[in-house]
Image (spheres, helix red, strand yellow):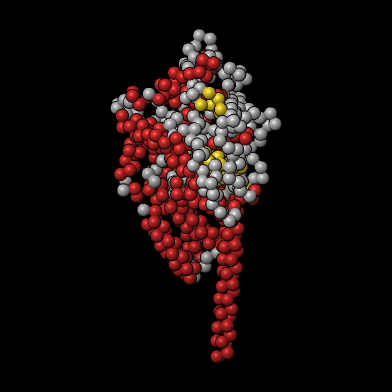
Amino acid sequence: MMGLMWYLLGMVTTGAIWGYVYLQRRYNLNWKANLGLFFAFAFAWICIGWSWGSFAEGEPQSGAMGLLNFGLPALILALFTWRKFIQPESK
Amino acid sequence: MKEQEKEKDEQVIDQHRRQLLKLSAGTIAGVGAVAGAGSWIKHRVEGVEQDGYPVEISPSFKRKDQRDVLLTFAGSKALGEKHPERNLSLSNDADGPAKSGEKSFNFQKGIYQFATAHTRADNNKVGYTQLDYALEQACWHGMNILAPLESMGVPNQGTFGWDQSEVKKEKYPFKDSVEILSAIKTAAKTFGAVRVGICKRDKRWDYDPLYDLTQEKTLTWEEDFPFEPKSVIVMLTDMDYDAMATAPMIPASATAAMGYTQNTIQGGGMAKFLRELGYMAVGSGNDLGSSVSYAIAAGLGEGARNGALIAPNLGPRVRISKVYTNLELDDAAYDKPRDFGILTFCENCKRCAESCPGNAISMDDKPSMSSTFAGSDDPDYNWQGQPGMRKFHNDAKKCFKFWCDNGGDCGACIASCPWNKPDFWHHRLIDASNTFTAGPVHTMMKQADILFGYGNTNDEKAVEKFWRSGFSGDFT
């Protein structure tokens, strides 16, 4: 169960690196965009790891709190970074 | 035209080189920062070695007379008759000292009530059914055969026997202390211990005199114990997380009982191993001395607010066995006490004290040199206290009274502790952060622990979950 999680997180990380390379080619990413993307990715990564781990250990409340506390900020930060710092900087 | 194109190409290449350089520098700086922070956190998580014993001990500190150890007193008819004032001091109706007109708590009757609780199992009461008690009794069974009454502090029992007649005459020719250390630690792993440490024998942590309640007689280290111990090997065994989560209900008592059974196997096994190697050795559980003090000295954890040992990654969900031996190591080979940042966390947390159904755990902000609970200045009431050590002094009598009322040995302070977590990566992340953060962050972490649903006690769903835990997940 946890082995599968680490495998998926590896895939997510690889996908994120590809996505980042694409964004860098397509847009002028300033330091604010880079920072926003980094933290959005970090929150999303922790969200998956925390929630998956919590459900696996049989603590659904912790899993739900993980989705709320890490997943929601990840979404908000990604959206904010996209709208404010990435979209206006298209090449 | 060609030259212009060439110049343009070179400019683009230069720009790419600059970008690559910037990216490389950024990556190196990032990796360096992460590696530096990582190694510092690792250093904190593994515990910072301390030069001396990490707990302040007063010059007036006295060794504990085993007749003042609560379980020894409770199990002894003779001590009950010798100290009738002790059986009049604790209120049976309310917390703390008995006031005039209040019925007092009798420790000898209490332990009888505790020991026979399984005969009053109630299949309509979740966590106290015949099923729960059957498991508890089965878990005690091993200890009852291998070292009976070890949990009550009775010395010289079964695998913890004092007989040294089988010690091999020829000592195994170890090359050096490192080889001895490695052999002992590997043996401990083989016996099923989850942690092991070795420290010098320290008389301060040994009961003096010892007391055998089955024979109602005192024993001395000098005349009765078979040799003069030089070192003490301390081993930890862990208790089941799901079972402990049911505290104070009976499955929690069952896993504690299994911890005692494991102690008799591990402590007894290690003593036998040393005797086969030509060294004198005696295994020990709750007898002979303070297991928590020795575990701290052996660098296995820190003494916590609840009076138990908190070991990194396991929290207080451990039982301790120890082995006294005349084997000696080079000074440098002994394990050193370590600071894991646990007691600092305890100062800000208080979750165990808030969860304690017997209100036995100190709510003080800081550890003190003597008891501060109600009645602590009355020697007839505070007979089991041991002043002269800076720690959180708890009222063990109230804890024991709850055991007797409950019919099982509780464990609420273990289940509720934020350090008590199963082995999942995110808990190790939080444990790591707790070792170097302080004050308000610790309080916040404790609140987060509650919000995330950990550390509940009296949780009937936990009993249901426990009884399914062997039939799901990786286990099956």
Q: Residue furthest front?
A: B169
The percent position of residue B408, horizontal first and vertical second, equals: 41, 28
Given residues A44 and B58, the one toward you in this image is B58
The percent position of residue A91, horizontal first and vertical second, equals: 49, 70
**Quadrant in which the N terminus of chain B appears:** bottom right
Q: Is residue B332 left or right of residue B88?
A: right
Given residues A42 and A1, the one toward you in this image is A1
Q: Residue at x 57, y 69 (%)?
A: B24
Q: Residue furthest right?
A: B59
Relative vertical location of residue B18 with respect to residue B190 in this rendering, above or below? below
Q: Residue at x 58, y 90 (%)?
A: B3
The percent position of residue B139, horizontal first and vertical second, equals: 38, 35
Given residues B51 and B362, the one toward you in this image is B51
Q: Residue furthest top?
A: B101
> Which of the 4 image quarters holds residue B288?
top right
Can residue B250 be seen? yes
The percent position of residue B5, horizontal first and vertical second, equals: 55, 86
Given residues B314 and B426, the one toward you in this image is B314
> Which of the 4 image quarters holds residue B251?
top left
Q: Residue at x 58, y 59 (%)?
A: B35
| Number of marks present in the image shown | 0
Relative vertical location of residue B347 with respect to residue B404 in this rendering, above or below? below
Q: Residue furthest bottom?
A: B2
Relative vertical location of residue B360 with respect to residue A52 in this rendering, above or below? above
Q: Residue at x 52, y 48 (%)?
A: B277
Can residue A70 be seen? no
